[in-house]
Image (cartoon, rainbow, N blue to C red):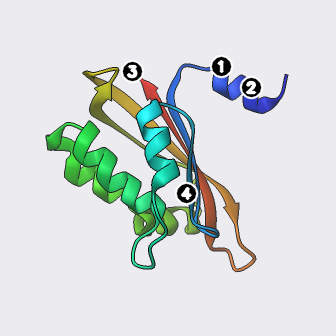
Amino acid sequence: MKLEDTVLEKDYYKIALVGLKPDKCDIIKGPEEEKRLADILLDDYHISRYEKMVQLVVKEEIEESYHNSCFQIFSLKYLQQAFEEGKAHVTCSYLRKVNGEMQMVSTSIYPRKFGEDGGLEEFMIYVSKK
């Protein structure tokens, strides 16, 4: 059994791999509609696929009272700064739709890869139901 298989078997609602170079946002495990959305997001010079995904998911799936904090925590600028300053992970909890019902979830974001210049290149997002 590979490590990937072990992680996928855990009770994660959603797992995503975000790459900044090249621009990618892959939903490894999660709702089918979010997987399809990630696949069809087009390249844009002004905003990354990940940032587009955050805008859409926060507006459509997350309880409105959590929007501001989620936009701030999930922002590339915030995550890049946190990880480049040595933070091991970023976590937060919020209400989001899970199988059509609002449920409290916990999200942990971990850096996965840094470039030679020390800049963040990839990170993983793990969302679990509380």
**Mark 2 crowd level (few <14, some 14–19, many ≥20, 10 Å Cα):** few
Q: Earlier in the sequence, mark 3 or mark 2?
A: 2
**Mark 3 crowd level (few <14, some 14–19, many ≥20, 10 Å Cα):** few
The residue mark sitting in front, 1 or 3, is: 1
Q: Earlier in the sequence, mark 4 or mark 3?
A: 4
Residue bearing mark 1: 9
User: Are the two marked residues, 1 and 2, in contact with CB atoms closer than 8 angstroms?
Assistant: yes
The residue mark sitting in front, 4 or 2, is: 2
The residue mark sitting in front, 3 or 2, is: 2
User: Which residue: 46% across, 27% down?
Assistant: 128
Q: Position of residue 74 (x, y in %)?
A: 39, 55
Q: Quadrant of the N terminus?
A: top right
Taking 119 as reference, is 106 above or below it? above
Element at label 3: loop
Q: Earlier in the sequence, mark 1 or mark 3?
A: 1
Q: Earlier in the sequence, mark 4 or mark 2?
A: 2
Element at label 2: helix
Amino acid type of the residue tagged 2 in the rendering: Asp
Query: Disc number at residue 5?
Result: 2
Residue placed most toward the observer, 93 or 3: 3
Q: Is residue 74 visible?
A: no
Query: Disc number at residue 130?
Result: 3
